[in-house]
Amino acid sequence: MNVDQAILSRRSIRRFQQQPIPLDVLKKFVNAARLAPSGSNLQPLEYCLVTEKALCDQVFEALNWAGYIQPKWTPNEHERPVAYIIILINDMTNQFYLRDVGLATENILLYAEGEHIGSCILCNINRNKLQEVLNIPHRLGIDSVIAFGYKGEIAVAEEFTDSVKYWRDELGVHHVPKRSLDNILHYNKFK
C-alpha cells in the first residue's frame, strides 16, 4: 500500500481479530516513530510495547473506549486488541513534546495501515494503573496508548453534515464524519 492509500483508508478500528501480530512488525512501528521529526531533534519519546496476553488484558482495563457510542461500549473479549504501544515522554519540560507525540503517532498509524493492521489511539486512560501494571518509572509521563490488531470491523469516512460524532450503522459499519476540503482550505488569504 502506498502512502496516499494509507492516508485515505486509515480510520480508527475498535474491533480486532484475535490473531497475533508478529513482533518484528510491531518493532517496525516503533522504528517508524523513532524516525519521525522531533523539535530541535531532542527526541523526548520512549515506547512500551505490550504483547503478552495477561498484560494486554490489564492494559485493556485501564482504557476507555468510543465515547460517542451509546450506550457505553467496549470491545468484547473476542474483539480486544492483541498489542499496544504506550507512548512515554522522558522530558515533560520539552516545549515540543506534544508535537513530537503527534508526528511519531502518525508514523505508527500509517505504517500499521500499510500492513493492513487496525489501530486506535486512546487518551482517556488510567495512567496510574498503566504505570503500576507496566512498571513504568514515575520520571516518565504517559501520553497515550495505541491499540493494535488485524481489523475486525469496517470503518469509513463520511461527509460531515452537522456533527463530528462517529456512529455505527445496523450492520456494524463504523462511520466517521470528516469536514470537506472546501470547508477547511483557504487560498492565499482567509476569506
Image (cartoon, rainbow, N blue to C red):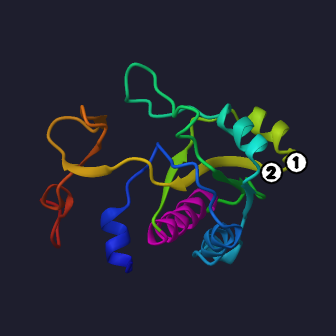
Name the one closer to the observer, 185 or 32: 32
- Residue 12 locus on image (x, y percent): 42, 50
- Residue 25 locus on image (x, y percent): 63, 71
> In the shown orientation, is residue 48 left or right of residue 37?
right
Quarter of the rendering containing residue 49? bottom right
Disc 2: CA contacts within 10 A as few (<14), some (14-19) or many (>=20): some
15 falls in the magenta region: no
Residue span colored magenta: 97-115
The residue labelled by disc 2 is: 140
Q: Amino acid at mark 1?
A: Pro
Residue positioned 88% across, 48% down in the render? 137
Quadrant position of the N terminus in the picture: bottom left
From where the camera sits, is residue 54 visible? Answer: yes
110 falls in the magenta region: yes
From where the camera sits, is residue 165 visible? Answer: no
Name the element at disc 2: loop
